[in-house]
Image (cartoon, helix red, strand yellow):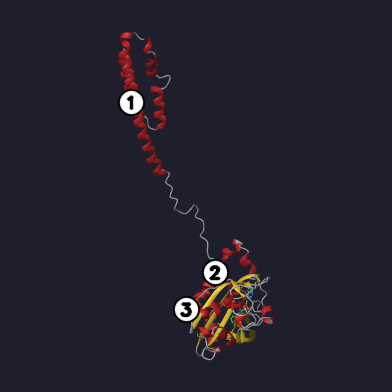
Amino acid sequence: MSVERIGKIEEEAAAAIAGAGDTAELEEARVRFLGRKAELTGILRGISDLDPSERGEVGSAANRAREAIEALVAGRAGELEREELGRSLETDRLDVTLPGSPPRPVGHLHPVTRTRRLIEDVLVGLGYRVVEGPEVEHDFYNFTALNHPEGHPARMLQDTFYVEPSEDLDPSCGSGPMDVLLRTHTSPMQVRAMEDSPPPLFVIVPGKTYRRDSDATHSPMFHQVEGLAVGEGLTLADLKGTLLEMLRALFGPDREVRMRPHFFPFTEPSVEFDVSCFRCGGQGELEGGERCGLCKGIGWIELGGAGMVDPNVFGFVSEHGYDPDTVTGFAFGFGVERIAMLRHGMGDLRFLFENDVRMLEQFS
Ligand code: FA5
């Protein structure tokens, strides 16, 4: 009777195990047929109480049945796990390469970077090559080789951050003081570029510059773009044509450029250049007679400095092919933030460096 019953239990277990639809149902079946209170467990536990003539037969049938049920549970568990994994791969699909939900807006370049790139595009289009130079510079390149003799008052025009006043730095820096400073303008690259390449030379130098300045239109760190053209027979007319071309590309095809006499130690003659006001069209007043606030009624907006390269500067690079008797050149330099402010109608340069995304987002 017991052996028959064991056969029945095995059949019932096989049916329950095969019918288990998920791992929870399978566990229920396992407990029902193999758990502490299961009928088969009871039979196994009671074998020692049986008549010795029955013990062998019932014991081996019960053990076989337990092993068979255990094997069925293990087999079904493997099947169910594979099915469940397949289902969850299908339904919980996660592609970590997809954008988040909702997608985060992609950032954009800072207005100063965009303006600098625009200026570079225009000047590269005119045949200039982009070169960059060190922001930590020797006094020699920042001042001496740009015709600022030691003790010359023009050194005071640009309030300089000195990094390291030193006696014995790079001796190749000639006879001037060899102090190390943060460059106050991009003009030191004029000399470095001429040391690197013989004429004809057409380079622009975008980059960071530093001065002890801070107000609505001046910041301690700002960007300049320098231009240098050297060849035979270049004149102030070529400078004016270049500036006109560049400023029309930046501020519109109807712009005019004007040059006013000025002083820079490294150019002779030197000028400051202005662009005709793009708000009032150079009239100084708006329709209705109101004074133009952008150019303050003048009709012109000041942009930067320029001039013909002083022969004394060529004297510092004469052994690199720059004979002051045969080559001439012009140079110009201006602030990138000033151009960005004008193009975007910003009143205060410091907005550009406060990193307030509400402000920066407007220029995407
Ligand atoms: C110069 O720096 C000359 N190196 C320019 C030059 C180059 C003249 C080649 C001749 C030949 P200046 O000090 O004027 O010049 O500065 C040029 C421009 O830099 C200014 O017109 C202004 O737009 C910008 N600038 C100067 N100081 C600051 C500052 N602290 N913050 C923001 N922009 C500034």
Q: Nearer the viewer, mark 3 or mark 1?
A: 3
Dot 3 and dot 1 residues touching (CB under 8 Å): no
Image-quadrant location for residue 28: top left
Q: Nearer the viewer, residue 300 or 230?
A: 230
Res. 276 visible in picture? no
Q: Nearer the viewer, residue 39 or 281?
A: 39
Measure how far apart labels 1 and 2 are at the Cα level: 73 Å
Q: Residues within 10 Å of mark 3 (few under 14, many from 20)?
A: few
Find disc 2 in the rendering and name its residue: 113
Image-quadrant location for residue 52: top left
Which amino acid, by three-letter code, is at mark 2?
Thr
Find disc 1 in the rendering and name its residue: 15
Q: Residues within 10 Å of mark 1 (few under 14, many from 20)?
A: few
Instruction: For ligand 1, tell me if the residue under mark 1 lies within 8 Å.
Output: no
Report the quarter where the N terminus lies: top left
Q: Nearer the viewer, mark 1 or mark 2?
A: 2
Which amino acid, by three-letter code, is at mark 1?
Ala
The mark that comes first in sequence, 3 or 2, is 2
Which quadrant of the figure shows ligand 1? bottom right
The mark that comes first in sequence, 3 or 1, is 1
Q: Is residue 66 above or below residue 160?
A: above
Measure how far apart labels 3 and 2 are at the Cα level: 18 Å
Find disc 3 in the rendering and name its residue: 125
Q: Residue at x 60, y 64 (%)?
A: 359
Q: Position of residue 81 (x, y in %)?
A: 38, 36
Q: Position of residue 87 (x, y in %)?
A: 39, 40
Total numbered labels placed on residues in the image: 3
Secondary structure type for disc 2: helix
Secondary structure type for disc 1: helix
Q: Residue at x 40, y 43 (%)?
A: 89
Q: Position of residue 57 (x, y in %)?
A: 30, 14
Which amino acid, by three-letter code, is at mark 3?
Gly
